[in-house]
Amino acid sequence: MRLSWEIELQCSQCGAPISLEETDRLLTCSYCHVKLYLWTPSQFCYCLPALKASSENLIFIPYWRFKGVAYSVIPFEVRHRILDATLLASSHRMLPVTLGIKPQALKLRFASGEIQGTFIKPQMSLQEAVMLIQKQFQVLEGSLLNQPPFHREFIGELGSLVFFPVFVRNGAIVDGILGKAIGPEKDLVLDEAPSGIPDHWQIRPMSTLCPNCGNALKGGRESILLFCTSCHVAWNPSSGRLVASKFEVAPGKQDSSVYLPFWRMQVAVTGITLKSYADLARLANLPKMIQSEWEEQEVYFWIPAFRVPSSLFLRLSKQMTLFQPVEKTEAVLPNAHLRPVTFSEESAAASLKIHLAHLLTKKREYFPKLHEITIGPVESTLVFIPFTSTGSELVHPQLGIGLPRQTLSL
Ligand SMILES: [Zn+2]
Ligand SMILES: [Zn+2]
């Protein structure tokens, strides 16, 4: 069984079939070699395929699909759990509450106006669906711990809408995939059911040529930023057009083999004193003598801008933040492998409090006060840091950081 969902799409240039994973954003048609970036103004919407024989009068029922990591700060550690679920987005009691394993077993298609049928509008938002699932976990967790967590945060990786086809036959609602009756037709009251798909749900493939120089932009399949190595510009496609965004690169060495992207965030903190590197050293109880110039030194949070398993995500951020790389940087892309940016600035900002909790040494003293502490970004910059490959590890000797190459599938 696949873990990731598979989507089928037609190349918008030549019509050839393209198969992609649900996290893919940058795709290349293997026939005409056009490179496209998939963009949608809202969530990505998919349809599960219906039985051939049932292709008329299909009714598409909406389900939210979300995946991400739920962090909770408990006595006295930061715990994380992967949340991967689907949830019925309307209030019909007879319909299955989740899609189960259907999406893993079948190939999905992007929802589009070409698919005939009635599409039912979701009655709850993605946020509401996530909250509902979170609440169930919270109840479970609270009863195990005898107290609610000090803080919790859900960092989403995916949030999409999936339509499940049903149809009516002999007064019964029939599962459009398996052909089995689900319940009586009279129980499915579809009020204000709009036909067709609203325009803003449809995907719009974008060109991936540099708007400045026309060269092909670089990125990985799941990239959220694209780079032009000719004119040294980072392009952000998230608004539906390519917008130049700032980045910096730390100088590499001869043997630097890969540059890893981080969000360097200057933060505003209330409820706890964290204004300088000296404050950070005290909170994290660094085994170094606090030097007087540290009292004046600006402090930044460094958060990986690429997706890694949660334990590594927490560790990398803690190590980078405690080391505070201060090398001079410049906005020139190196002629070396750049790790694609796959973790957004917004998600990084949302994870700040979790990173703060993770690096505090006096957890018993500070965790109960976490709800009074606020932390948010004032300014953030994408910074590439060079790493060197040594056998099975990627290391940064000056920073004393190592991470297994395997987790990055290099
Ligand atoms: Zn093509
Ligand atoms: Zn360019």
Image (cartoon, rainbow, N blue to C red):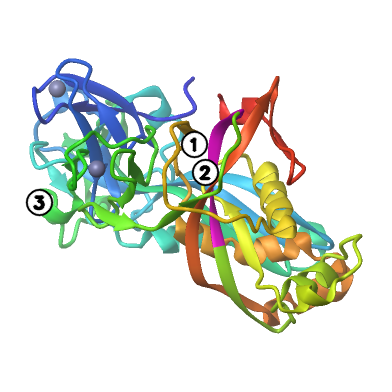
Residue that badge 2 annotates: 306
Left/right placement of residue 222 relative to residue 392 reads left
Asked if residue 154 is positioned above or below residue 101 in the image, the reply reads below
**Region in magenta:** 255-264
Q: Residues within 10 Å of mark 3 (few under 14, many from 20)?
A: some
Instruction: Identify which residue is drawn at 66% across, 69% down.
Output: 299
Q: Which residue is nearer to you in this view: 238 or 52?
A: 238
Q: Is residue 120 above or below residue 253?
A: below
**Ligand 2 within 8 A of label 2's CB?**
no
Q: In which quadrant of the rendered view does residue 23 lie?
A: top left
Q: Three-letter amino acid code at disc 1? A: Arg
Residue 154, image quadrant: bottom right
The residue singled out by tag 3 in the image is 195
Report the Cα–Cα distance between label 2 and label 3: 39 Å
> SS at mark 3?
loop
Q: Nearer the viewer, residue 346 or 133?
A: 346
Q: Find residue 403 and report its image quarter.
A: top right
Q: Secondary structure at mark 2?
A: loop
Residue 283 relative to residue 410: left or right: right
Answer whether labels 1 and 2 touch (C-beta < 8 Å): yes
Tell which circle, 1 or 2, labels the residue nearer the N-terminal end. 2
- Residue shown at the point (34%, 24%) measured from the top left: 106
Residues at marks 3 and 1, CA–CA distance in whole angstroms: 43 Å
Residue at which label 1 appears = 339
Residue 126 percent across, percent down from the top left:
39, 58
Q: Is residue 152 visible?
A: no
Quarter occupied by the C terminus? top right
Q: Residue 98, position in %: x, y?
A: 44, 43
Residue 27 magenta: no
Note whether 67 is above or below 154 in the view shown: above
